[in-house]
Amino acid sequence: MPTILKFDGLRAVIYLNDHRPGQVHVMGQGCEARFDLRCPHGPLELRENHFFTHARLNRIAALLGGQVQRLCKDWRTLHGRH
């Protein structure tokens, strides 16, 4: 699972054996969340949250939201267009 981004003590990864739709997992500090990318232009959609606070999720979503096109490109590189 390649780490795509690192920020605030967290890492965003795309699993190599993951399924559609394109998604990114954010993990760290005992928490994990999954966001659907809604490629190619977003907006992100939170699909799962395990232990992140609402405020922290908002910060994560804001950061990832500015990177959607890059994250979608990374997803396509790893998984193809399907």
Image: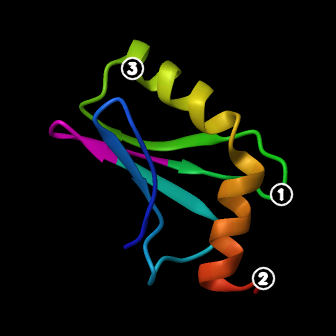
Q: Magenta segment, which residues?
A: 27-34
Q: CA distance from mark 2 to mark 1?
A: 11 Å
Q: Amino acid at mark 1?
A: Pro
User: Disc 2 designates what residue?
Assistant: 81
Q: Is any atom of residue 21 visible in this view? A: no
Residue 12 percent coordinates (x, y): 43, 51
Q: Earlier in the sequence, mark 2 or mark 1?
A: 1
Residue 23 percent coordinates (x, y): 57, 59
- In-front residue for pair 5/35: 5
Q: Earlier in the sequence, mark 2 or mark 3?
A: 3
Q: CA distance from mark 2 to mark 3?
A: 31 Å
The answer to whether 16 appears left or right of 29 in the picture is: right
Characterize the local packing of mark 1: few (<14), some (14-19) or many (20 or more) Cα atoms within 10 angstroms.
Answer: some
- Does the magenta-highlighted stretch encompass residue 30? yes
**What element does badge 3 sit on?**
helix
Do residues under tags 1 and 3 come within 8 Å of each other at their CB atoms? no
- Does the magenta-highlighted stretch encompass residue 15? no
Q: Which quarter of the figure has residue 48? A: top left
The answer to whether 10 appears left or right of 61 in the picture is: left
